[in-house]
C-alpha cells in the first residue's frame, strides 16, 4: 500500500538480538569513556611502592599507546559508636585522600605524556582494582608490592590480586 503505514499492534513483542541486548546492558551498567578502554589500570595511594607502580604504568601506557586509569581505593575506616545499652554501630568515615592525590597528579609533569583519569573506589582493594579492570577492559593491572607486617598477616594486595584477576597483573617491587 503506497503512502500508508500500518502501525504495529501495541501488544506485539519485538524479537531482539540477545548479543546486542547483552552489549547494551553491559554498556549501560558500566559507562566509561571509550578513550580509556583497553588501558592500563594502576593502584595508587601515594606510597613509595605505588609511586614506582605509577611510573612503570605510565611507561607501559606510553609504549602501548593506551590510556592510564589510576585507581585510589579509599579507606573506609570503621568506627564504633556506642549508644548506652544499644549494640555498637559501625560507621564509615570517608577518606579525603583522593582529592589530595588528584590535585598532586594534576600538577605532575610526568603525566602529560599519556591520557589519564583518577577513579575513586571504596572497599576491598583487590576486588575494586579487578572491577575497574573489567569495566575498562584493561590490558593489565599494575600494583606495587606490599612490605611490612600487614602484608605478611593479611596477605599482600599483589598476591591476592594475582590469584583472582582475569587479566595480567604486574607487581613492581
Image (cartoon, helix red, strand yellow):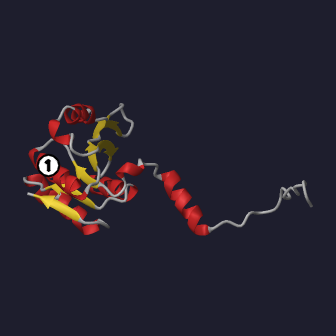
Q: Residue furthest right?
A: 1
Placement of 79 over or under 26, stated as above or below:
above
Front residue of 101/65: it is 65
Position of the C terminus by quadrant: bottom left
Residue at left offset 12%, top offset 56%: 145
Front residue of 83/26: it is 26
Helix or strand or loop: what does disc 1 sit on?
A: helix
Q: Position of residue 143 (x, y in %)?
A: 18, 55
Count of residue discs: 1
In the rendered structure, the answer to whether residue 148 lies left or right of residue 106 reads left
Residue at left offset 26%, top offset 61%: 140
Q: Position of residue 28 (x, y in %)?
A: 52, 52
Position of the N terminus by quadrant: bottom right
Quarter-of-image position of residue 104: top left
Placement of 149 over or under 102, stated as above or below:
below
Residue that badge 1 annotates: 55
Front residue of 89/12: it is 12
The crowding category of the residue bearing disc 1, from other C-alpha atoms within 10 Å (few below 14, some 14 to 19, many at least 20), is some
Amino acid at each position: 500500500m503506497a503512502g500508508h503505514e500500518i502501525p504495529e499492534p501495541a501488544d506485539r513483542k519485538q524479537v531482539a538480538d540477545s548479543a546486542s541486548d547483552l552489549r547494551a546492558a553491559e554498556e549501560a551498567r558500566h559507562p566509561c569513556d571509550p578513550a580509556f578502554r583497553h588501558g592500563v589500570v594502576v593502584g595508587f595511594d601515594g606510597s613509595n611502592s605505588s609511586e614506582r607502580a605509577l611510573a612503570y604504568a605510565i611507561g607501559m601506557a606510553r609504549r602501548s599507546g593506551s590510556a592510564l586509569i589510576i585507581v585510589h581505593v579509599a579507606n573506609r575506616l570503621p568506627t564504633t559508636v556506642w549508644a548506652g545499652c544499644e549494640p555498637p554501630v559501625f560507621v564509615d568515615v570517608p577518606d579525603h585522600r583522593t582529592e589530595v592525590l588528584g590535585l598532586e597528579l594534576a600538577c605532575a609533569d610526568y603525566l602529560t605524556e599519556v591520557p589519564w583519569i583518577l577513579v575513586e573506589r571504596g572497599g576491598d582493594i583487590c576486588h575494586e582494582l579487578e572491577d575497574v579492570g573489567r569495566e575498562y577492559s584493561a590490558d593489565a593491572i599494575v600494583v606495587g608490592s606490599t612490605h611490612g607486617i600487614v602484608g605478611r598477616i593479611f596477605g599482600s594486595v599483589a598476591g591476592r590480586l594475582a590469584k583472582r584477576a582475569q587479566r595480567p597483573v604486574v607487581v613492581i617491587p
